[in-house]
Structure formats: structure tokens, C-alpha cells
């Protein structure tokens, strides 16, 4: 049974890779903005190592068996835009969990000009995605996860909706290595009046190496639609400060495909009594620095 499921998963990833490499322009670019300050601090290298509510974005297989957790995140993005995130994971059994993740993107005011370049007003964009996720550990250390997403987008008063799915798998090689792969945004087109555009399909694969209890290093590659091969690499050093208190330092680099943003990142986190606060500084060179703060609560 597991072997048949593995073949189905492989076929899905091959098909998704072909779609991503062959796709042209895409709508819903806000879907490319990642979730969670922990991942951001590690250069968005998270397809293998993300767990809990953050994993609904990165790799839905990462929530398999996860205990209840609530996530809230605020991202100050490029050009005065922002992304707000809220999510929750519910443990259903020892090896299965379900979750929901909501992302809301706001562009702020954008100048509207006529054909002579004269400003004639302003408009704004707003986008939202709601993902419903389920993950199950099919065998010891081989979880599979799927997310079904509703996507809504409004540009200058014109609204569009679409539906999509994410698929993810993880595989643990002992206690030190974890392999992960995911495909994002397989679904319908967004249609604005008579204009229809594809969603930004993205295929990711990565490897997480755990060097003892404190140090974790991860490297990912991704194939975005309408772009070129990109990679991410990051590291986290986490220590216990005694009792239920812990702290972590993170650093990473992202070399994104065409149309995305690349740069260095750094972050830190602290946890106490089941409450975790993470911060990430994302550096995009001439485009300036961006900031993300996340709050996670065990429930």
C-alpha cells in the first residue's frame, strides 16, 4: 500500500515540476511570501524542517502528529506592503493532525496614472488565502500532507477567486537527516474580468541535518513557475536555558528564482512555558530591510 502511494506522490511531483518549468506569468504573487519568522531567519530553508502551524505553508506533511499550536505572524514587506498570518493545528491522533492557515496581504495605496503619466488617484490591492490541511504518518517517519486552499484577490475593486492544493512529504533517515519535498498552488486560474492568469506553482525539495541537539542546518531548492531554479540555506542554533525556557539564533541566505527577492537573513527566538516569540530580519539590498515577528502558543 505504501509503495503504491509513493508512486502516486512521485507522479504528482513530476507533473508539478513540468508545470512549474513550463508556466508563464502568474497571478497571486502574494502566495510566494513565506510564513513564519523561524523559516525567514533561516533564509526560507524550511521544506524539511518546518513543523506545527508554519508547516501548513512550507510542507503540509510537517504537521503530522503535531500537538495543538496557534500561530500569529506579522510581516513588513517590500514597498510598504504587509502580510498578516494566523493559523492553528489540532492533533487528531498520535500520527495525524489537521490545521488551518489564513494569510492576508495588503498593498497599501498605489498611485493611479493616466496615459500621460499624470496622477489621477490611488488604488489598493488585497489578497487572502485560507488553507485547510491534513497530514498522516503513513509509516514510521514517512508522513504525507495535503492542503486545500481558497484564494481571493482584489485589484482596484476587481475581485477574483480560485482554488488550489499543496502536497508535501517528509522522510526521516535516522535521527540526523530529514528529506522533504512539496508542491504549492496546483489549481485553477485567477480571472480578472476577461484576463486569466495562472497561480504561481512552486516545487521544493530539501535536506535537514541535525548536528546533535542544538545545531540544525538545512538546504532547499525550488522551481518556481515563470522563474529559474533557486536555492535557500540556513542554520539554527537552539539551546535550553533551564526549565521550560529556550533560545535560538538563526542565519540564512536565499537565492530566489526570477521575479522573487534574494538576500541574507538573520533571526532569533525565545520560548517560555509553551509560548514562543521569533523575529527575523530579511535583507534585500537596495530594496531595504524587511521584518517579521511570529508568536506561537502550544494549546
Image (spheres, rainbow, N blue to C red):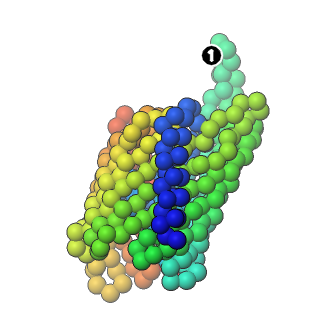
Q: Is residue 61 above or below residue 41?
A: below
Q: Position of residue 20 (x, y in %)?
A: 51, 40
Crowd rating for badge 1 (residues with CA inside 10 Å; few <14, some 14–19, many 20+): few
Farthest residue to the left: give it.
211
**Residue located at (45% from left, 75% from top):** 139
Query: Would residue 261 appear left or right of 67 to someone viewing this image?
Result: left
- Check the image and name the residue furthest to the top: 116
Residue 160 to residue 286: above or below: below
Residue 150: give x, y in percent of width and height.
Answer: 68, 54
Indicate the secondary structure of the residue bearing disc 1: loop
In the rendered image of this protein, does residue 121 appear above or below residue 71? above
Farthest bottom residue in view: 243
Give how far across and how far down residue 298 sits, in percent: 50, 79
Residue 27 % position (x, y): 61, 38
Give the camera-side residue of 98 and 85: 98
Q: Hey, which quadrant is residue 292 in on the image?
A: bottom left
Q: Residue at x 61, y 46 (%)?
A: 106
Q: Is residue 215 left or right of residue 94?
A: left
Query: Can residue 257 be seen from the camera position used here?
Result: yes
In the rendered image, the vertical position of residue 42 relative to residue 88, given as above or below: above
Q: Is residue 77 visible?
A: no
Q: Which residue is mark 1?
A: 117
- Tell me which residue sits at (29%, 73%) in the image: 174
Q: Tell how many labels.
A: 1
Amino acid at each position: 500500500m505504501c509503495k503504491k502511494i509513493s508512486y502516486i506522490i512521485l507522479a504528482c511531483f513530476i507533473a508539478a515540476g513540468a508545470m512549474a518549468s513550463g508556466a508563464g506569468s502568474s497571478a497571486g504573487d502574494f502566495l510566494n511570501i513565506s510564513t513564519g519568522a523561524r523559516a525567514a531567519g533561516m533564509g526560507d530553508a524550511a521544506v524539511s524542517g518546518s513543523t506545527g502551524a508554519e508547516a501548513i505553508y512550507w510542507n503540509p506533511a510537517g504537521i503530522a502528529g503535531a500537538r495543538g499550536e496557534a500561530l500569529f505572524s506579522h510581516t513588513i514587506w517590500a514597498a510598504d506592503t504587509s502580510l498578516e498570518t494566523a493559523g492553528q493545528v489540532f492533533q487528531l491522533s498520535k500520527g495525524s493532525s489537521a490545521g488551518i492557515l489564513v494569510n492576508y496581504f495588503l498593498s497599501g495605496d498605489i498611485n493611479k496614472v493616466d496615459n500621460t503619466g499624470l496622477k489621477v488617484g490611488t488604488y489598493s490591492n488585497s489578497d487572502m488565502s485560507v488553507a485547510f490541511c491534513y497530514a498522516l504518518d503513513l509509516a514510521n517517519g514517512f508522513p504525507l500532507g495535503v492542503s486545500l486552499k481558497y484564494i481571493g484577490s482584489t485589484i482596484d475593486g476587481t475581485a477574483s477567486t480560485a482554488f488550489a492544493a499543496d502536497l508535501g512529504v517528509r522522510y526521516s533517515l535516522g535521527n540526523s537527516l530529514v528529506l522533504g519535498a512539496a508542491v504549492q498552488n496546483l489549481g485553477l486560474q485567477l480571472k480578472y474580468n476577461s484576463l486569466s492568469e495562472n497561480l504561481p506553482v512552486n516545487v521544493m525539495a530539501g535536506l535537514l541535518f541535525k548536528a546533535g541537539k542544538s545545531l540544525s542546518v538545512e538546504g532547499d531548492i525550488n522551481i518556481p513557475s515563470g522563474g529559474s531554479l533557486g536555492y535557500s540555506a540556513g542554520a539554527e542554533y537552539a539551546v535550553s536555558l533551564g526549565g521550560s525556557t529556550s533560545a535560538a539564533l538563526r542565519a540564512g541566505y536565499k537565492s530566489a528564482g526570477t521575479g522573487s527577492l534574494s538576500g541574507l537573513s538573520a533571526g532569533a527566538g525565545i520560548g517560555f512555558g509553551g509560548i514562543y516569540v521569533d523575529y527575523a530580519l530579511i535583507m534585500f539590498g537596495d530594496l531595504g530591510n524587511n521584518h517579521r515577528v511570529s508568536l506561537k502558543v502550544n494549546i
